[in-house]
Image (cartoon, rainbow, N blue to C red):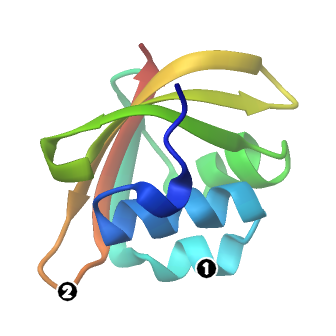
């Protein structure tokens, strides 16, 4: 059963999912610390290139199935025009100022 985005526990993660699903790159980037990093399937990636390729130019969309760790870990169906749909995990590090300094994703 999918969790409605508005019901996600962590405000930063909720805003991240909202920005992804709205295709709002500026909003997503505004949620990140200036030195934010990310990894995909265990390998660090260039964040700007990755979000452009995997989210925005390929119309990425997240449907969250489960959350844990105070809402900072998600199990979700992720789909985009490049890869289709897959079950993925997302783990977020959120700083005291409410911005995301790192996220890690990959197939679940």
According to the picture, the residue beneath numbered tag 1 turns out to be: 27
Dot 2: few (<14), some (14–19), or many (≥20) neighbours within 10 Å? few
Asked if 54 appears above or below 8 in the picture, the reply is above
Q: Disc 1 and disc 2: Cα gap in Å?
A: 16 Å
Task: Judge by depth and name the residue closer to the eye, 103 or 73.
Answer: 73
Residue drawn at (54%, 33%) of the image: 2
The answer to whether residue 92 of the structure is visible from this angle is yes
Sequence-wise first label, 1 or 2: 1
Quarter of the picture containing the C terminus is top left
The answer to whether residue 40 of the structure is visible from this angle is no
Dot 1: few (<14), some (14–19), or many (≥20) neighbours within 10 Å? some
Residue drawn at (70%, 55%) of the image: 21
Task: Judge by depth and name the residue closer to the eye, 51 or 84.
Answer: 84
State which quadrant residue 13 falls in. bottom left
Asked if 20 appears above or below 68 in the picture, the reply is below
Apparent side of residue 14 relative to residue 56 in the rendered image (left or right): left
Asked if 40 appears above or below 41 in the picture, the reply is below
State which quadrant residue 26 falls in. bottom right
Badge number at residue 97? 2
Q: Return the x and y of residue 70 as percentages of the image width and height.
A: 16, 51
Q: Return the x and y of residue 84 as percentages of the image width and height.
A: 80, 19
């Amino acid at each position: 059963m999918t969790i409605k985005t508005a019901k996600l526990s962590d405000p930063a993660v909720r805003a991240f999912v909202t920005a992804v699903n709205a295709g709002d790159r500026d909003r997503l980037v505004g949620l990140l610390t200036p030195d934010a990093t990310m990894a995909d399937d265990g390998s660090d990636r260039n964040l700007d290139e990755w979000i452009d390729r995997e989210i925005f130019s390929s119309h990425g969309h997240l449907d969250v199935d489960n959350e844990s760790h105070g809402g900072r870990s998600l199990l979700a169906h992720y789909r985009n025009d490049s890869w289709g749909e897959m079950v993925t995990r997302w783990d977020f590090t959120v700083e005291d100022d409410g911005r995301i300094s790192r996220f890690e994703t990959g197939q679940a």
